[in-house]
Image (cartoon, rainbow, N blue to C red):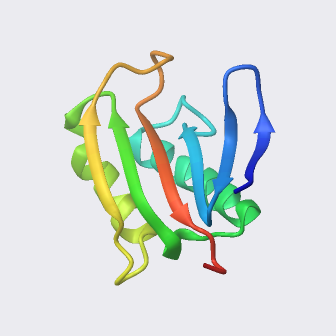
Amino acid sequence: MTIERLHIGERMSRIVKHNGIVYLSGQVPKDASKNITEQTITMLDKVDELLLEAGSSREHVLSATIFLKTMNDFSAMNAVWDAWVPEGHAPARTCIEGAMARNELLVEISVIAAERNT
């Protein structure tokens, strides 16, 4: 049972693969100066890129944990999320309010997905 780690940093790997499952580290927006809609779009763009690199896709997402700086952004984030999730492929999901690593961040996501070939 091999564990594959990609983009290994001092504290974490951005992608970890094990037994046909892809684990992504928490992903934040590309530009934290934008509003919640733009932050969510660019965050999910990063998820798409990492899933593709890992041999997966949004159709294979099993679980997502979304962190919002404030639940006041729940509806706006969900509008982007709903457009991103392919019909019939909604993963298990949790959305919670929490403090962010940087004050300007409004949203972060952690994703677990199956590889395409499993």
Image quadrant in which you'd find residue 29: top right
Image quadrant in which you'd find residue 35: top left
Quick one: quadrant of the C terminus?
bottom right
- Residue at 74% in and 54% down: 2
Q: Measured from the top left, where is residue 86 in percent x and y? A: 43, 78
Q: Is residue 60 left or right of residue 96?
A: right
Above or below, 92 relative to 6: below
Above or below, 20 relative to 40: below
- Residue at 33% in and 50% down: 77
Q: Measured from the top left, where is residue 43 in percent x and y? A: 55, 47
Above or below, 54 relative to 70: below
Q: Is residue 15 left or right of residue 70?
A: right
Quick one: quadrant of the N terminus?
bottom right
Q: Measured from the top left, where is residue 99 in percent x and y? A: 35, 19
Of residues 76 and 9, which is closer to you in this image? Answer: 9
Q: Looking at the image, how many numbered discs can be counted on the residues?
A: 0
- Residue at 34% in and 71% down: 90
Image quadrant in which you'd find residue 33: top right
- Residue at 62% in and 66% down: 20
